Amino acid sequence: MSDGAESGPGAPAQPRLVREGVPASSGIGIGRAYVVDRRRVHVPRTRIDKEAIEAEIGRFLEALRDTRQEIEVIKTRLPHGEHRAILKAQQMMLRDPDLIGRVEQLIAEELRCAEWALATATDEIHDMLDQADDEYFRERSSDITFLSEQVILALLGDNPEEITPPAGSVVVAYDLSPAETVQLHRCAVAGIVTAAGGKTSHSAIMARSLQIPAVVGVAGILGEVMSGEVVVVDGVRGAVIVRPDVDELGGHELERDEYNAFEQRIQREHAFPAITVDGRRVMTRANLSLSEDIDLGRRYGAEGIGLYRSEYMFMNRDALPTEEEHYLTAKTVIRRYSPYPVVFRTFDLGSDKPSKLLSFAKAEANPAMGLRSLRLALREREIFLAQLRGLLRASLHGPLHIMLPLVGSVEELEDGIAAVEEARDQLEAAGMAYASDFSLGVMIETPSAALIADLLASRVDFMSIGTNDLIQYTLAVDRDNDDVDYLYQPLHPAILRLIRSVAAAGAAHDVPVSLCGEMAADPRYTWVLVGLGIKELSMSPSALPVIKHIIRQSSAAEMDALTAAVLEARTAREADEIVLEVMRERFPEHLKHGGGRSALVEEDDG
């Protein structure tokens, strides 16, 4: 790695450049570019003698150990939390028996040198992950590539040049490893821009956790900026401005200062409850995953966990999580958030979110509608029962909510309830204690579930609307397909009516209804969701302070009035215009700083 050539006084003046990407970490960073030129490691492709097989495998295993130790050194310099969890996950990848076994096979059977064998095995894993529908799994391919390159460098005896940008600079690279992102935090960089990656890449997660403004997925950026040029990183809208003129730069500096002041003001109030000026209470909870720091929600004022994604316990592992592991994980989270509740979604896996620990008979043409979530859990019953037993045991330590995902019918719900009852019977037979007052709920993310919410409500203790999939299934729009993402419309009349009917069904049966999709984190939709009858919102932790502040500055009457007007809209575009006009007038700062890239698109569309 090396930093690129700097632009100098003799270089010809270049025009201003604006590029869009994915807003990975909020904030606005301004500084001079520090370009990281990452060239792919040259992999020797040589054959070895049969007599050298054992020595070659030993050389490979030693390089694995050395790479794991390098990560351990970085990890020990960090405080406990999300940063260390990500690096630990990478260490676990380097112990993957499938990867190690495949490399050893290529060395022993095809007499490939260790570097060549590792590169081949990595490419095979890369191809498999790239076919996954879920963005999280696609992003893991970049982690595998990084780790493979580090091991190959160890095999070659090369040490990659450390990235050491000056304080206040903006790092521009093709991609960055989590370890490199930590190093950039120590260097006090102003921002990060990468050509690759998405919101769920580990480098993006690290940037958010370390609060470094970042925009990722900016195609072609490496060929368009030189070290030393001024770069603005707009991590709110997902924009990168290279070589801004003097007036524009001054405007961005002012916006940066305003953003930082707004963030500080909002953060000071994060612990206050979300109650409107006329007394309507909205519970605000956090969405968390195993890879995230469990303290993150408390740090941002969460009143419990509205969605704990338990499927992450099945990732980057050599063996299935045991009942004891499920118990200890749930116990830790419940104790941390008591007296607030924690909602554990049972594992939401499938061929769209694959785990090497679960086998699938065939590749599915449409995995989003295939064998996944509760359907898969009911087929893999022993694995499901082990999770349920662990969760039920943890109910002794505080308010436990178990949520069944992707339920489409009363029959599926009954099958899920039967599994919970079976797990209870097994615990009682074994003399294991659990609390009898745990809550069982269902995730409403299919149109069928939304339309029979009244029937489901009569059998559960709570319901939670997952708008990401509900919008996808209702509007027949693949949310990961760029060609049709313009049709992904949260304010489509069909979506609004479904949310309203689910909230009404819950109220009629005295069953709480929460909403845990991306809509909950978007300040444009806060009034509408509350006006539709949603009394609990769950979102990414960092979104909580802004949403809570909006609610505290609002009245239930004006929320209801806006919602009534939106429900009269005939199209999603008409509904968007009504909402944006009101919310821009009432909360210009909140939409400007909390609306993300979608807010910028709306502004550009007029």
Image (spheres, rainbow, N blue to C red):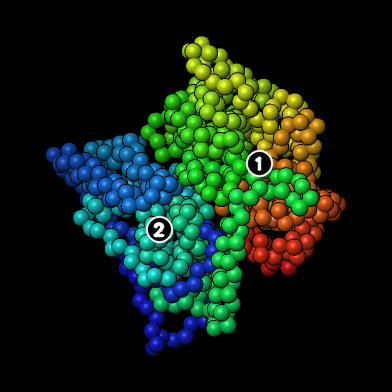
Q: Residue furthest top?
A: 429
Name the element at disc 2: helix
Quadrant location, the C terminus: bottom right
Q: Is residue 397 above or below residue 200?
A: above
Decide: few, some or many residues near mark 1? Use Cα within 10 Å; few <14, some 14-19, many ≥20. many
For this view, does 600 lie left or right of residue 187?
right
Q: Is residue 390 above or below residue 270?
A: above
For this view, does 473 lie left or right of residue 1?
right
Write down the quadrant of residue 91 in the picture: top left
Report if residue 536 is visible in the image.
yes
Q: Amino acid at mark 1?
A: Gly
Name the element at disc 1: loop
Give whichever of 345, 439 is nearer the camera: 439
Measured as percent of width and height from the top left, residue 377 is found at 55, 27
Q: How many marks?
A: 2
Label 1: which residue? Answer: 466
Measured as percent of width and height from the top left, residue 268 is found at 58, 57
Quadrant location, the N terminus: bottom left
Q: Residue furthest bottom?
A: 10
Q: Is residue 233 above or below residue 8?
A: above
Give whichever of 535, 93 is nearer the camera: 535
Label 2: which residue? Answer: 181
Q: Amino acid at mark 2?
A: Thr
For this view, does 151 lie left or right of residue 376?
left
Q: Residue furthest left?
A: 51
Measured as percent of width and height from the top left, residue 467 is found at 67, 44
Residue ID at (22%, 54%): 156
Residue ID at (36%, 60%): 183
Write down the quadrant of residue 97 in the picture: top left
Cα gap from disc 1 to disc 2, whole angstroms: 32 Å
Decide: few, some or many residues near mark 2? Use Cα within 10 Å; few <14, some 14-19, many ≥20. many
